[in-house]
Image (cartoon, coloured by chain):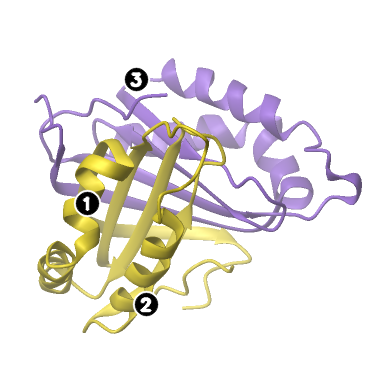
Chain colours: A yellow, B purple
């Protein structure tokens, strides 16, 4: 995986943080498959700029997914699409003990190597 | 770990995304210890609201840490403190093949359970 090649700010970031439920026997109950499908779906939406995620290895750990969008309207449209998938409903009870979504305006960025934009 | 109990937006989020270097033999070269120290240090700074992180289990995977701050000034002050630690310099060459920092204004949030604020 590589970091998302986002453009010069401003643009919109959606931070999705969640605590995975503990699972008897350690199976992921389809979480990995769902996450892959959601990424494919996001990439087809207007205004999609990229996605980054880090998944906790252990149960009870924190997962963070950040998706990047051209503007707030694109982020809102994605929320509607996501809510119509099975993932959103099932996720509340099966996959996540707790989750939080934060919608942000990216003001500036820096890094190493320097952002290509 | 629990999700950060952030207040009603707006506030500032600093998204730190990185790709871990591949390590011969699989040791973390002190990364875990450094990450713990950085969190302690952040928690002592003015305007600190909380932190969330998800660390990749596998080498070459993506780590994401999001720290939350009362405002942009607090986020800038933290950057200066962080740069004066060993972590920042060493991190560029030892721990991270690639990293990106994005400083954002959180505009709104939602979740389950609903945010307490």
Q: Name the residue rendered at 68%, 30% in the picture.
A: B32
Q: Which residue is mark 2?
A: A40
Q: Are marks 2 and 1 in contact (CB under 8 Å)?
A: no
Q: Which residue is mark 1?
A: A90
Q: Which residue is mark 3?
A: B46
Front residue of A89/B31: it is A89
Q: Position of residue A11 (x, y in %)?
A: 26, 68
- Mark-to-mark CA distance, 2 and 1: 18 Å
* Disc 3: host chain: B
- Please indicate, yes or no, whether residue A84 appears anywhere in the rendered image: yes
Query: Which mark, residue A58?
Result: none
Q: Name the residue rendered at 26%, 57% in the picture.
A: A14
Of callouts 2 and 1, the N-terminal one:
2
Q: Please check whether the numbered discs 2 and 1 fall on a single chain.
A: yes
Position of A105 with respect to B94 (left or right) is left
Label 2: few (<14), some (14–19) or many (≥20) C-alpha neighbours in 10 Å? few
């Amino acid at each position: 995986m590589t970091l998302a090649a986002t453009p010069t700010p401003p643009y919109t970031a959606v931070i999705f943080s969640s605590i995975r439920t503990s699972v008897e026997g350690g199976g992921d109950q389809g979480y990995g498959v769902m996450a892959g499908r959601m990424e494919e779906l996001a990439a087809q939406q207007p205004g999609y700029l990229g996605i980054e995620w880090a998944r906790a290895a252990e149960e009870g750990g924190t997962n963070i997914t950040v998706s990047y969008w051209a503007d707030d309207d694109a982020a809102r449209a994605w929320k509607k699409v996501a809510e119509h998938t099975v993932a959103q409903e099932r996720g509340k009870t099966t996959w996540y003990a707790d989750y939080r979504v934060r919608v942000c305006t990216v003001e500036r960025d820096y890094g190493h190597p320097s952002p290509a934009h």
